[in-house]
Image: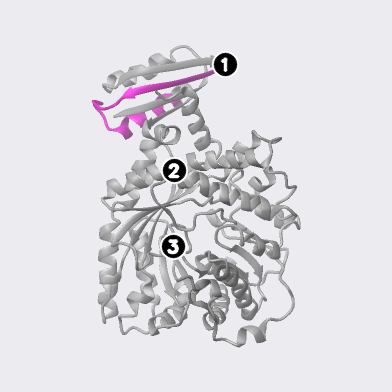
């Protein structure tokens, strides 16, 4: 029999501490939609996705109603479009993005991810056309998300792709200058991209995945922070234990929702992603968890140790709560989406260099970072190169989602709205990396890739 | 199928009567009630069997929440599994 205190604890997490399911993401393979005629290919994509996902939004609402837990987003991730569109004779892939946006609107979902290419070792003609189409595709759609994997631990870093992505990001920002460079908020450059990640903008449905599956991402930084408020004088062993227990409870919610969604939609359950995903809402911040551990501001000395502890404890607590864990699974540190991070940047406590270091010990990478509009494509490429090197050498996922906000300078603010939040424009190193980026070619895979 | 009704808010006469009346109308059996009042704060959790309910879960949930609004209280109906999955291994 449940005790009243257990019931009230759960309600308090939901009502006061922002516990929610961030996303139910349906992954759908489009490999059987390949066709030489682009029109036919797009029609097959439309038929398949709207067939599988026709009840996704309704089931999301039903589960929210039955269990009383908010489900913030319903999303779809598809096979990297470069693999599918590459079968067609089309030269311009923007029409594939427009079709994805139409599908998202008709189904009422929040985002559709997978306008993607995997080029860590080199380009196919389809990859090249897709990447060339990214700026127009993202500027001309609302719900389409794009990602490009430019490096893996096994293959090394494709510096030609790194160089090109700097230019693609600049162009995407220019095309959406009136919205602060909004297109860049829907574009991620990855090293070691996971194939079952439910979180945007980097979600796509990998080629090793089944025809269709349900992946779920939870969110609960506020719950962890509130739990830590009760152990202010305790040592770090206690802090780690409290985080583990809280992560277990949060993840059990994700597992329950994933199983229910899978059953009701008659689609296999894929994974629960253990990531702690913040939102701009007050009290839903990863930065504030670190500050609760005793840091005056996120970004000061001690931040890396605090984040390492948090990230590890979340995984240890979460892993036992789910039958299958995957995706990114770690604490997220998106600057514009986290009230504590925004404040830390404004106060001068958090710099881009510290953020880079933070990405060595937690999930993902330089995420939702606004930089001055006059930042060169080469500097953006060099930032991507640094971040991918961290991922490749440490055998982990890293990513860059950076917005060179047109017309803005360091200290300005860019409004993205909704879950994407408010980005304080961060200053960068003033010295040039142009000649480094222009070399091109491939940075070889590190020795740790040879594990056989 | 079991569901939990939670009621929170300022104490007043007739809270349990109002909530139970809706449950009875909808053919929902009450299995257990736990209720306390601390200062003026009324807290009640109720375990119910909704297996033979005469209305859909969402209709029952909407009716209870509407009654909560009338009485100035927070009322929530939730499937029991959310609590079991969080607090029981």
Q: Which residue is labeled 1 in the image? A: B40
On what subunit does the disc labeled 3 rest?
Answer: A
SS state under label 3: loop
Residue at image location 52% in from the left, 32% down from the top:
A12
- For residue A243, side relative to residue A347 (left or right): left
Does A409 appear above or below B35? below
Give the x, y percent position of residue A125.
Answer: 39, 85
Residue B69 point in image, percent of width and height: 45, 26
- A208 over A13 or under it: above or below: below
Q: Give the residue number, with chain letter if any, for mark 3.
A: A203
Chain identifier of the residue bearing label 2 in the image? A
Residue A363 occupies which quadrant of the picture? bottom right
Depth check, mark 3 against mark 1: the one in front is: 3
CB contact under 8 Å: marks 2 and 1? no
- Residue range corresponding to the magenta coloring: B40-68
Residue at the spot x=34%, y=80% of the render? A86
What residue do we see at 47% from left, 11% from top? Answer: B13
Drawn side of residue A41 relative to residue A417, left or right: left
Q: Is residue B45 magenta?
A: yes
The mark closer to the camera, 2 or 3, is 2
The residue carrying mark 2 is: A321
- As measured in the structure, the alpha-carbon distance from the residue carrying label 2 to the one carrying label 3 is 23 Å
Query: Residue shown at 72%/44% (left/top)?
Result: A294
The chain carrying label 1 is B
Residue A143 location (% of width, % of height): 43, 63
The quarter of the displayed image where residue B41 is located: top right
| Distance CA(mark 2)–CA(mark 1) | 38 Å
Q: Report how far apart the C-alphas of labels 3 and 1 lie in the structure.
A: 49 Å
N-terminal label among 2 and 3: 3
How many tags in the picture? 3
Between B78 and A109, the residue placed more toward the observer is: B78
């Amino acid at each position: 029999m449940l005790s009243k205190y257990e019931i009230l604890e759960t309600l308090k997490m939901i009502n006061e501490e922002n516990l929610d399911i961030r996303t139910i993401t349906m992954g759908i393979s489009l490999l059987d939609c390949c066709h030489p005629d682009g029109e036919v290919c797009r029609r097959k994509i439309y038929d398949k996705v709207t067939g599988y996902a026709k009840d996704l939004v309704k089931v999301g609402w039903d589960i929210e109603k039955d269990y009383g837990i908010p489900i913030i987003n319903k999303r779809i991730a598809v096979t990297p479009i470069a693999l599918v569109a590459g079968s067609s004779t089309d030269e311009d892939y923007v029409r594939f993005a427009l079709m994805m946006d139409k599908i998202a609107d008709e189904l009422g979902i929040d985002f559709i991810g997978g306008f993607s290419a995997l080029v860590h070792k080199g380009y196919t003609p389809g990859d090249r056309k897709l990447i060339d189409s990214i700026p127009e595709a993202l500027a001309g759609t609302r719900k389409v998300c794009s990602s490009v994997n430019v490096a893996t631990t096994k293959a090394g870093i494709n510096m030609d792709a790194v160089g090109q992505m700097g230019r693609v990001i600049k162009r995407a920002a220019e095309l959406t200058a009136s919205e602060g460079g909004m297109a860049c908020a829907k574009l991620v450059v990855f090293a070691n991209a996971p194939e079952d990640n439910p979180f945007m903008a980097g979600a796509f449905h990998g080629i090793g995945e089944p025809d269709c599956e349900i992946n779920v991402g939870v969110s609960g930084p506020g719950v962890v922070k509130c739990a830590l408020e009760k152990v202010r004088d305790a040592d770090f062993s206690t802090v780690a234990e409290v985080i583990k227990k809280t992560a277990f409870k949060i993840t059990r919610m994700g597992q329950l929702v994933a199983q229910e969604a899978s059953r009701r939609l008659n689609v296999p359950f894929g994974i629960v992603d253990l990531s702690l995903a913040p939102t701009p809402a007050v009290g839903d911040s990863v930065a504030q968890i670190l500050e609760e551990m005793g840091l005056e501001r996120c970004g000061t000395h001690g931040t890396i140790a605090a984040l390492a502890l948090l990230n590890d404890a979340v995984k240890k607590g979460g892993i036992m709560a789910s039958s299958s864990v995957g995706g990114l699974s770690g604490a997220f540190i998106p600057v514009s989406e986290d009230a504590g991070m925004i404040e830390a940047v404004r106060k001068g406590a958090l710099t881009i260099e510290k953020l880079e270091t933070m990405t060595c010990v937690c999930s993902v990478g330089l995420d939702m970072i606004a930089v001055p509009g006059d930042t060169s494509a080469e500097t953006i490429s060099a930032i991507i190169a640094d971040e991918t090197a961290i991922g490749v050498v440490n055998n982990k996922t890293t990513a860059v989602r950076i917005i060179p906000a047109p017309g803005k300078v360091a200290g300005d603010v860019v409004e993205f709205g909704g879950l994407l939040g408010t980005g304080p424009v961060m200053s960068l190193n003033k010295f040039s990396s142009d000649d480094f980026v222009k070399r091109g070619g491939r940075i070889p895979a590190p020795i740790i890739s040879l594990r056989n | 199928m079991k569901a939990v009704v939670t009621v929170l808010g300022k104490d007043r006469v007739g809270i349990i009567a109002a909530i139970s009346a809706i449950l009875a109308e909808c053919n929902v059996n009450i299995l257990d009630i736990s209720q306390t009042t601390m200062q003026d704060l009324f807290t009640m959790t109720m375990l119910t069997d909704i297996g033979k309910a005469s209305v859909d879960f969402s209709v029952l949930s909407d009716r209870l929440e509407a009654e909560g609004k009338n009485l100035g209280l927070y009322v929530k109906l939730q499937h029991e599994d959310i609590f079991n999955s969080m607090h029981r291994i």
